[in-house]
Amino acid sequence: MAQKGHSEDSGHRSLIDPEAEVAEDVELGEGVIIGPEVVIKEGTFISSGVEIRGDTYIGCNNYIDRGVLMGFQPQHLGYDDERTRLIIGNNNYIGTRATLHRGTEERGMTKIGDGNHLGTCVHIAHDCLLADNIRMEEFTQLGGHVEIGSHSQIGALTGIHQFVRLGSGSQVEPQAKVNQDVPPYLKAGGHPARLKGPGNCPDSEVKLQIARAFELLCRSDLNVSQAAKEIEANLDGAEITEFLTFLDSSDRGICR
């Protein structure tokens, strides 16, 4: 049965709106505030000073650290109080004082998948889509509509421009400024970020294939379209197909 109304934890009062749905085994720290449209599933721990508002869904077994703000309205001048959502999956860690905003009417939601680690003071802006098993270090900031694929790693103090995409297995070095797309399984760094070589590849054979793709994309005189044709002609495998699909669908261009 879900918790309703005020909740006491170790003598300290947390405020749960009567309309919220909070599983009985959810642990609440001191001074937690949960709004009326919030749903929180089993096994989640919410530390002190957390505030969760808006139409926010939080799955199972998440750890939400001190002072996190979640589900507040998007920081977007065009937002006019439309009904939008924040969706959090299962088994995520959300670090101290992180901020996660709802979507705008354009996408309707901000969504975080499963098994992600979001460090201290990260900012997830409106309409972002994060897949699974992403590690994002402290003070990283995502602009609106950023998309990040599974098994990506983003270093501390990194800024990612709105509408940028990071493919699966991508890596971004600390303090990078990312204003164009990072293809799957490649590493980027710098200010502005440029591709540097293979990233988080699933095995050595894939890493070899991706290294060859990187050479064609970034160390030849070919443009992106020409490099893609050479990659398609000379390399194969599921990851290469994913890599080529990403190149073909890039709107902001590749940070090569």
Image (cartoon, rainbow, N blue to C red):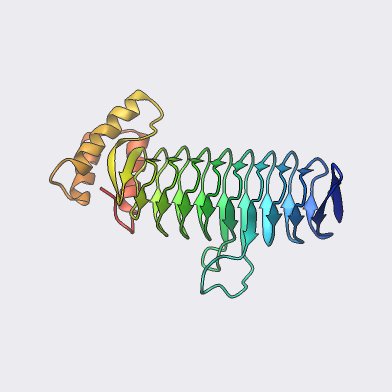
Specify whether residue 4 is in view. no
Dividing the picture into quarters, in which one does residue 25 lie? top right
Residue nearest the observer in this picture, 183 or 123: 123
Task: Identify which residue is drawn at 72% across, 41% down.
Answer: 45
Q: Position of residue 253 (x, y in %)?
A: 29, 55
Q: Residue at x 64, y 68 (%)?
A: 83
Extreme residue toward the top, this view = 204
Query: In the picture, residue 188 is in which quadrant?
Result: top left
In the picture shown, does residue 124 fall above or below 25?
below
Q: Identify the residue at the far left of this view.
A: 221
Q: Residue at x 49, y 41 (%)?
A: 137
Compared across the picture, whether 152 is left or right of 224 comes to right
Task: Tell me residue 54's x, y (percent).
Answer: 68, 62
Q: Could you tell me which residue is drawn at 33 percent across and 58 percent down?
A: 252
Kindly tell me whether residue 158 is visible in this rendering. Answer: yes
The residue closer to the viewer here, 46 or 201, is 46
